[in-house]
Image (cartoon, grey):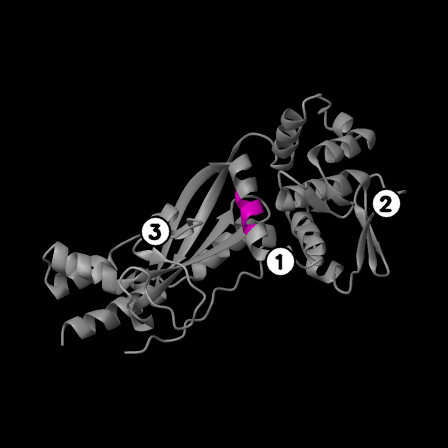
Amino acid sequence: MATAKKKPLDLSAFPSASVTEYSTLVCLACVFEIFTKQLGFAPRTAYSEIRKYSPTIAELTAPKALPPFFDSDDKQAHCPYCNAGKRWHALLETIRIEGGKASDAARRALIKKLPQKDNQFQLIETKSDKRAIFFDWLDTLVRNLNLDEESWLLEATRAYLGRLEPKTNWIEVFEGLRAVRRSQRLSEGWEREGSRLFLAPPIYNEVLIVQYLVSRSHVHGGQTLEGRLTLFELIRRLRYSGYLDAKELSGADQSDTLDAIIEKLAGGQGKVKLYHIVDRREFLDRVKSVYARYAM
């Protein structure tokens, strides 16, 4: 029994920095094995219980999937635990939306449009602190960048600016862009001239910090628009540019200074409300398909 192609959710109304998308596969052969063989459930009972199963946010968003979940980009993937083929796999997609003025109206409109039948979508609300959210954003950014290509520097710049000014259409601003420079005349904001984007010094410095955090290593430092910088070199540049004084971060210890900088970039201390939308449509279809085989 084939599963129908589901229309993806329209996320175009959201600032890109407010949305994080996750996906993971679950092996239903493993799941049915647990319910029918280990727990002794009849196939019909197992089917009913599995349909009601709601994975935790940790299971859905873990950097490394744990059984019975697994990650694979192979179109003909086999379960790493039981070797079951594609027809036994169900995709679970999760959209995480950061609460805030920039996203709340779009989130309410999206949730209002979701079908209510058969619990096709699961809504889960959680809270996290701003620092954790920032590091989650960095981790996602790293996974989506190819650090072997020089173009990642522009992509990382655009991603940070999207987080800084979520209402700006940065895809349009970066169209045909070739270089990002520190502005000698702007004290705040940005401007584009031809194929170059000029950033006010404070914003440019923060772009360097993000690029450093994305690409740093203990030996060679991090790659930035200003070349590869060690932590010492980065902090020195920030100090000489006046950034540390402006942010009241002029402490002498490098590690403490970097830690304080990260807290500033994260938006300080405080909690953020997170809204998770779990797309269970393919999961429900696959469970029905697998049960049909068991019931034959």
Residue 192 left/right relative to 134: right
Q: Is residue 142 in sight in this rendering?
A: yes
Residue 69, image quadrant? bottom left
Earlier residue among tags 2 and 3: 3
* Secondary structure type for disc 1: loop
Q: Amino acid at mark 2?
A: Ser
Q: Which residue of the protein is positioned furthest toward the top in this rendering?
A: 252
**Which amino acid type is shown beneath numbered disc 1?**
Asn
Residue 218, horizontal then vertical, whole percent: 62, 38
233 w.r.t. 30: above or below: above
Callout 3 amino acid: Leu
Which element type, helix, strand or loop, lies under badge 3?
Answer: loop
> Can residue 78 be found in the magenta stretch?
no
Which residue has dot 3 on it?
A: 66
Q: Earlier in the sequence, mark 1 or mark 2?
A: 1
Question: Total label count?
Answer: 3
**Sequence-wise, which precedes: disc 3 or disc 1?**
3
Q: Position of residue 277 (x, y in %)?
A: 42, 54
In three-dimensional space, the C-alpha distance between marks 3 and 1, rounded to whole angstroms, equals 25 Å
Position of residue 269 relative to residue 48, above or below, is above
Look at 23% across and 59% down and name the residue there: 31
Main SS, magenta residues: helix
Where does the magenta region start and end?
Answer: 136-140
Task: Look at mark 1 in the image and give the residue it sits on.
Answer: 146
Which residue is denoted by mark 2 in the rendering?
A: 183
Q: Label 2 crowding class (10 Å Cα cut-off): few <14, some 14-19, many 20+?
A: some
Quadrant in the picture for the N terminus: bottom left
Label 3 Cα crowd, 10 Å radius (few <14 / some 14-19 / many 20+) = few
37 relative position to 265: left or right:
left
Give how far across and how far down residue 292 sits, in percent: 19, 74
